[in-house]
Image (tube, rainbow, N blue to C red):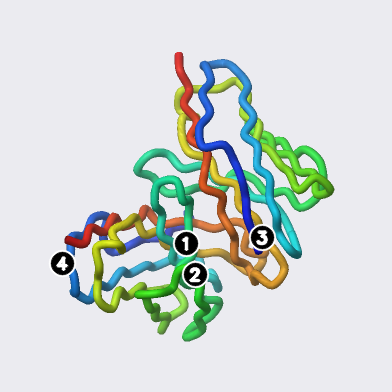
Amino acid sequence: DVKVTQSSRYLVKRTGEKVFLECVQDMDHENMFWYRQDPGLGLRLIYFSYDVKMKEKGDIPEGYSVSREKKERFSLILESASTNQTSMYLCASSSIDREGYEQYFGPGTRLTVT
Amino acid sequence: GQSLEQPSEVTAVEGAIVQINCTYQTSGFYGLSWYQQHDGGAPTFLSYNALDGLEETGRFSSFLSRSDSYGYLLLQELQMKDSASYFCAVSYSGGYNKLIFGAGTRLAVHP
């Protein structure tokens, strides 16, 4: 069974802290994504990776960075957390064989920055 | 640019049929996907249309008209468990396997 896991379901951090969100997929997918989800705004792409060590900025990359050292793992880093980064963060993966239209999502991490 | 529009909320009763519309403005359009997300859950893939017409998968069907830049998700024989948010998403040339998601439609099914 296809699986995407995220390191935490809930996280509370202080303003200015460095925050690491981890995502692991077990499907040998080439593509991995980080989204944030806010009410009324849908899913907005933060960063995308199509291969190990390869990354591409999404629509809202400011304040974030990513790392993909292994195919199965994609990390999102908040360099200096701010209150406007309080959100639900969703990781997803997809295979290039399906042209990316079928993405598999993790359960999400609800991050609160105080 | 790329944009999608879908209604923010839809309400229906059990056993009824509901249609959730999605219009898009996308350069290099490839196809339209639909995802379902229950409260507190992860989005899950429902369907994909790359060609005009209706695709049926059980109680759910999805339609695409490329000439009208329009699609819809049709849910039949509604059940309480269908209460969820539904997102349309487009894939496009130059996007390299990325999707652009709509803001989502919250469906409430009442007894």
Q: Nearer the viewer, residue B38 or A61?
A: A61
Q: Which amino acid, by three-letter code, is at mark 4?
A: Arg
Q: Are marks 3 and 4 on the same chain?
A: no
The chain holding disc 1 is A
Which residue was labeled with disc 1?
A92
Which residue was labeled with disc 2?
A32
Which residue was labeled with disc 4?
A14
SS category of the residue bearing label 1 = strand
Dot placed on the residue nearer the N-terminal end, 4 or 1: 4
SS category of the residue bearing label 4 = loop
Q: Are marks 1 and 3 on the same chain?
A: no
The chain holding disc 2 is A
Which residue was labeled with disc 3?
B91
Where is residue B11? Give x, y as percent.
51, 23
Give the label, 3 or 2, closer to the camera.
3
Q: Which amino acid, by three-letter code, is at mark 1?
A: Ala
Whole-angstrom CA distance, mark 3 to mark 4, is 37 Å
Q: Is residue A28 above or below residue B12?
A: below
Whole-angstrom CA distance, mark 3 to mark 2, is 15 Å
Give the label, 4 or 1, closer to the camera.
4
Q: Are marks 2 and 1 on the same chain?
A: yes
Q: Is residue B24 left or right of residue A26?
A: right
